[in-house]
Image (cartoon, rainbow, N blue to C red):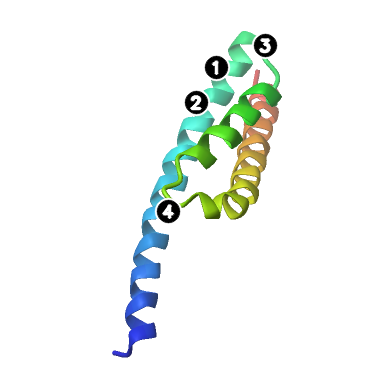
Amino acid sequence: MDGIGKIRERIDEADREMVGLWEKRMQLCREVARLKRESGMGVRDRKREAEILESRGGMLRDPALKDYLVPVMEEILRQSRRMQENILEEEGKHV
């Protein structure tokens, strides 16, 4: 296999790892949604989101990638909120 093919295999493996981590994160967000519902909290916590965006950029070994990570994290947060809203809406229908 040529060089690009080998690199693509490594990208595929990284994607598999990311998908597993994404699933784990979303499962945790489900738990958060239920706790928020029980305590009467809203879905969005702008302070927490700002902390996440700032801290995750600091986790990079290559700081030049921060400008590329921030939009990805913003989308992850958006999808997490969307799922939490759906959970709260669904559970509200069954209460």
Amino acid type shown at disc 1? Leu
Taking the image as drawn, is residue 45 in sight? no
Q: Which residue is mark 2?
A: 31
Upstream in the sequence, badge 4 or badge 3?
4
| Among the 4 quarters of the image, the one containing residue 15 | bottom left
Upstream in the sequence, badge 4 or badge 2?
4
Q: Is residue 14 above or below residue 55?
A: below
Label 1 sits on a secondary structure element that is helix
Label 3 sits on a secondary structure element that is loop
Tell me if mark 1 has few (under 14), some (14-19) or many (20+) residues whose alpha carbon lies within 10 angstroms of its own: few
Taking the image as drawn, is residue 88 in sight? yes
Residue 14 screen position, x and y as percent:
38, 61
Amino acid type shown at disc 3? Gly
> Which is nearer the eye, 32 or 9?
9
Residue 6 screen position, x and y as percent:
32, 80
| Real-space CA distance between mark 4 and mark 3, rounded to the nearest whole angstrom | 32 Å
Label 4 sits on a secondary structure element that is helix
Identify the mark at residue 18; answer none if there is no mark: 4
Upstream in the sequence, badge 4 or badge 1?
4
Amino acid type shown at disc 2? Glu
| Real-space CA distance between mark 4 and mark 1, rounded to the nearest whole angstrom | 26 Å
Q: Which residue is mark 3?
A: 40
Residue 50 screen position, x and y as percent:
65, 30
Upstream in the sequence, badge 2 or badge 3?
2
Q: Is residue 71 left or right of residue 6?
A: right
| Among the 4 quarters of the image, the one containing residue 54 | top right
Q: Which residue is mark 1?
A: 35
Q: Mark 4–mark 3 contact, CB under 8 Å? A: no
| Among the 4 quarters of the image, the one containing residue 86 | top right
